[in-house]
Amino acid sequence: MPEPLSYASLGVRRVINAAATLTALGGSVMPGEVVEAMRMAASSHVDMHELQAAVGAELARLTHNEAGYVSTGAAAGLALSVLACATKGDPAAISQMPRGHGLPTDVVMHCGHRIPYDRAVELAGGRIVQIGNAIQTFGWELEAVLGTSTAMVLWVAGSHLSPGTLDLAETVRIAHARGIPVVVDAAAQLPPVENLWAFTQAGADLALFSGGKALRGPQSTGLVLGRATLIEAIRANGAPHQRLARAMKVGKEEMLGLLAAVRRYLAIDHPAEQSAWEATVARWSAELSRLPGVTAARAYPNEAGQPSPRLHVGVDAARAGVTGAEVVERLWQRDPRIAVAADGENGFFITPDTLAPGEDHAVLDAIRDQFGAPAGRRAGRPGDPARHRRPSGGSRRSGGKDGAMNPAQATFNFTGQVVCVSGGATGIGAASAAAFAAAGAHVIVADIAADDALRTVSGIIAAGGDARYVSCDVADSDAVDAMMDGILATEGRLDVVHANAGLESTSAATDVSLAEWHRVIGVNLTGVFLVCRSGLRHMYRQGSGVLVITSSPHALATVPDAAAYAASKGGVHALTRALALEAAPRGIRVNALVPGTIDTPMVHREIQVAADPAAQLARLAASHPLGRLGRPEELASVALFLASDAASFITGTTVHADGGLMAALPSGPALPYNTGAS
């Protein structure tokens, strides 16, 4: 079998992007919910006209606009806007483009708004008519050039542009008095989130945004919002029609991916995000200012005029022994590469908003390395209080009938160890993360459910533990490898991996779609494999480590309507044994834990389909000889045991913590689902 495709398999280095959301660096990193939406869209055919209209309508609803359209990038959105304004969607006029004989094709721009990307106007057959100069523009200059040959006025947003141009309100007033539409190029003008509707509410007819920057949608997408008649004209010019803009085709996967990205962006706590960026910049500044020959100062706004902070690092080569340009080049030559924004020979900028959780530490350490300073954050460093918290005393108590146990009272000690828990946002994973942290470990909580994961991390920190969140879709090989590489770059080691991410499926074998099958197998089995494979590669180099895998009783005995789920968990059992045999000669242990019905959000979601959810929950509890549901903390204690030296002679096995469920002959309700991130 050929090696699965990845950057590494192609000999391409991953990049930690501390520069900006640049197309040359792939824009941004798509969150798990965006990738999942694209994966779903790829599973079947669809009427593309219908899909573009439906996605556009939902985008419009979400952003308080009349209509919306997904383009192939903001530049394509600009070209399509020119075509729409010139042709009004008339097929006869469309056939005249890009020559545009007899059509209005002039696009008026302020001199102070000229940017490299305005060549998209010419690509569509438009002719740029420039007004004003680099310093200022007067209203009479705009009025003088508007006429029957004018298709539109292009107004470019951004506080980094010339302040002497006409503002949007004045531009709209003059243009609309002559019946000329105004299009705002706001490709990089998120945040603030309000810009998604602010420009059109201020009178702009269309507003254009990049889908692959702050929105973190597919890099190949753009978002066009505004007046319904012009959006319809854009659709008339674009694919799947066999017209000029067919070359700007957008796929079904990109459409749903961008929609998922916009939904996510609107739900973000933007003030909290800004506060986190400010805290990172402040910490960078304090640390780097201590280096000889280095000055560090907050810079605001960023290079695109966005209200986001970044840090300017100035370098006095005579005192530092290295130039700023040399630091930039050396950072780029690392593996993974680190991209920063060069600022001449003696400085550079670094930004936090493009970094994955934890990468801010990797960037800081890498920069310090260039000036001969020791790394500032390594796991197990003597005297580091975050690595030497000891759990409170007391012996472990039997779970018994009530299961009462505080994981922090366990005798296990993971002081100075680094633990990664996938599917750590809620349920068993969250309990495992909290228990490892209470036992002294530094915990990385990996999940695609950012809000839940951050709550888990906050709870750990509030209890005196040490944890951070990393967004990771375990079914994505590159994302998993990037996460593990980031952990090693930041922490210097990886001691325990608890592969816990999972999801349920309740479809009969004859009804389960191929997409659902791939989704369940992709997370529950392939995801476990990818997390374990990547973790083992680092543990092999390190010479130590432990893998703990969450499985399910469905691997051994299942019920109807669980084909995909049972198959995935049966594979997990086999995978556990295979990995254990491969890793044993290197002193690395691999085991699986098998829960019964655990009182998690996943179980509570599942019982809602029953006629009487409360009665169903009672039946599930009664199916266990102990007469109750398990608690996530009880499973977490088993995970700690399997990862501890107390289990040093245990590998390749499955440990049941199921309240006696698998010991009894079938006599009650069907086996429940149990595992995973929920």
Image: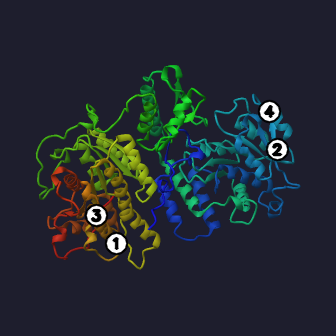
Residue corresponding to mark 1: 567
Q: Secondary structure at mark 4?
A: loop
Q: Amino acid at mark 2?
A: Arg
The answer to whether residue 11 is seen in the rendering is: yes
Q: Tell which tag, 4 or 3, sits nearer the viewer.
A: 3
Q: Amino acid at mark 4?
A: Gly
Disc 4 to disc 3, C-alpha distance: 70 Å
Disc 2 to disc 3, C-alpha distance: 72 Å
Q: Secondary structure at mark 3?
A: helix
Q: Quadrant of the C terminus?
A: bottom left
Of residues 546 and 241, the one nearer the viewer is 546
Q: Position of residue 620 (x, y in %)?
A: 23, 67
Circles 2 and 3: CB atoms closer than 8 Å: no
337 in relation to 566, above or below: above
Residue corresponding to mark 3: 576
Disc 3 to disc 1, C-alpha distance: 14 Å
Image side of residue 501 versus residue 261, left or right = left
Q: Tell which tag, 4 or 1, sits nearer the viewer.
A: 1
Q: Quadrant of the N terminus?
A: bottom left
Q: Tell which tag, 2 or 3, sits nearer the viewer.
A: 3
Q: Secondary structure at mark 2?
A: loop
Tag on residue 178? 2
Q: Amino acid at mark 3?
A: Thr
Disc 2 to disc 4, C-alpha distance: 19 Å
- Mark closer to the chain start, 4 or 3: 4
The crowd level at tag 4 (other Cα within 10 Å; few <14, some 14-19, many 20+) is some
At a point 81% along the width and 36% down the height, the residue shown is: 131
Q: Would you identify the image quadrant in which residue 573 lies?
A: bottom left
- Mark closer to the chain start, 3 or 1: 1
Of residues 195 and 483, the one nearer the viewer is 483
Q: Amino acid at mark 1?
A: Ala
